[in-house]
Amino acid sequence: MQPDLGAVRLTLELATVVTVLLLFIGTPIAWWLARTRSRLKSFIGAMVALPLVLPPTVLGFYLLLLMGPNGPIGNITQSLGLGILPFTFSGLVVASTLYSMPFVVQPLQNAFEAIGERPLEVAATLRAPPLDTFFSVALPLAKPGFITAAILGFAHTVGEFGVVLMIGGNIPDRTRVVSVEIYNHVEALEYAQAHWLAGGMLAFSFLVLFALYSFNPNRK
Amino acid sequence: MKRALLSLLLLGATFSTASADEVQVAVAANFTAPMQKIAADFEKDTGHKAVLAFGATGQFYAQIRNGAPFEILLSADDKTPAKLEKEGLGVQGSSFTYAIGKLVLWSAKPGFVDSEGKVLGSGNFQHIALANPKVAPYGAAAIEALTKLGLYPALEPKVVQGENIAQTYQFIATGNADLGFVALSQIVKDGKGSSWIVPANLYPVIRQDAVILAPGKDKPAAQALMAYLKGDKAKAVIRSYGYDL
């Protein structure tokens, strides 16, 4: 059972790091998408949403090439003395951040859009500077959106499989997350261990969604 | 009228697939390239079509146990076919050794792997790739060799696992892993990079057996493919990929 606990811990660590990162990266992107009238809006919106429709294998394949020793990202990380990202925890963080991006940005964007212009204009007439408006008006009003985004981002990262399989290298305690460990167990006919993890994932996923729906009963 | 024509067409399609004799073959990933060649020859020479699926032997075993419709397994070991025969999932007495595999240490970088494999001891690399030893016999052989060399404990933190020998090859070919253990058959043809053929005394013989599975029991195409694999033409292909026979 010991290695499985390692996989569980690793998965939770990964999901936590990715969720925090995504809230920081996703908030400005979502804010911009919600407010901008720029022509670039559709372009950036489509870029962010891509992982929703792409097979994880596409992302895994390109990341492997881009982050590899001959890829542009690989060149940068190597010249910074970081080595290459595939087969490392950081590599999984990068991949998961991209992969879970729409699950965080879209709820945030919806929340920001739902605020509308009015509260922001009122704040402006009260001479609140834009940053102040953002932090004391927009953020509190968008709180449900943040909770939804965090839960979805976390849950989706926990549930990730294909990308990790392609760039992870199945290393205990570093890249062997729960979904990969389940796959290993099933392929090796270790059904008892697979049941523990798979059943756990099922319960976890249901609870997350249940929490999400109970939390948002008033949003139609 | 249109509908009648369409159903006639569909009927025709069903019949033609039923009469064209196909055999579903699960092929250990290390045997991918030679088997593609052999299957093409087989179709030309006999008219039967071999439909190939590639993967790790252990994965196939799990799938066969759970009712996968494969009719022949070309395993990367001899244990799996023996087990399948004993469990009644393989046809008694049908298995035979179609190739003896060779393990090779390979890097995509020229000059990286020396002719005696000393690079392993130097530890002068970030990642060393091998196939998941639980399901891939070549992965198990790699661990065995490293253990015999007394290097496994030191190298273990650098090991990355491919799901099967093909993904392992891909990790190394893209340079993401500096070097790793693959099957000689995977690298023998294009000769890129640098390699060391692991001495046979460092790992148990990789006897690769073929077996007819229960769904292929009375199928002429399955029998034909097994016979074809034993023939000189197939043997020449198998040898050309660096296997012993």
Image (cartoon, coloured by chain):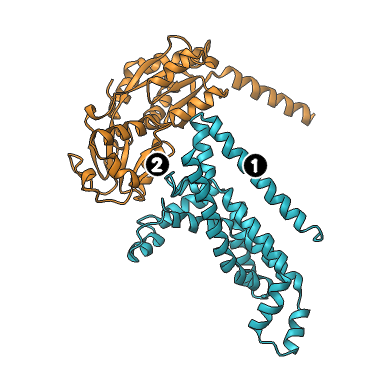
Residue furthest toward the front?
A2
Q: Estimate how packed mark 2 is, as few (under 14), some (14 to 19) or many (20 or more) residues with alpha carbons within 10 Å.
A: many
- Quadrant in the picture for the N terminus of chain B: top right
Q: Is residue A124 above or below residue B88?
A: below
Colour cyan belongs to chain: A
Measured as percent of width and height from the top left, residue B176 is found at 36, 50
Tell me the subunit letter for badge 2.
Answer: B
Front one among A142 and B185: A142
Q: Is residue A151 above or below residue B73?
A: below
Left or right: where does residue A137 sit relative to residue B149?
Answer: right
Report the disc number at residue B161. Answer: 2
Q: Secondary structure at mark 2?
A: strand
Q: Secondary structure at mark 1?
A: helix
Choose top left, top right, bottom left or bottom right for residue B13: top right
Colour orange belongs to chain: B
Choose top left, top right, bottom left or bottom right for residue A77: bottom left
At label 1, which amino acid type do we have?
Answer: Leu
Residue at the image point whose x is 50% and y is 44% from the top: A5
Residue at the image point whose x is 39% and y is 25% from the top: B38
Report the disc number at residue A202. Answer: 1
Give the Cα distance between marks 1 and 2. 27 Å
- Quadrant in the picture for the C terminus of chain B: top left
Measured as percent of width and height from the top left, residue A120 is found at 73, 81
Front one among B16 and B236: B236
The answer to whether dots 1 and 2 both sit on one chain is no
Measured as percent of width and height from the top left, residue A135 is found at 66, 78
Tell me the subunit letter for badge 1.
Answer: A
Choose top left, top right, bottom left or bottom right for residue B211: top left
At label 2, which amino acid type do we have?
Answer: Gln
Residue A29 in view, yes or no:
yes
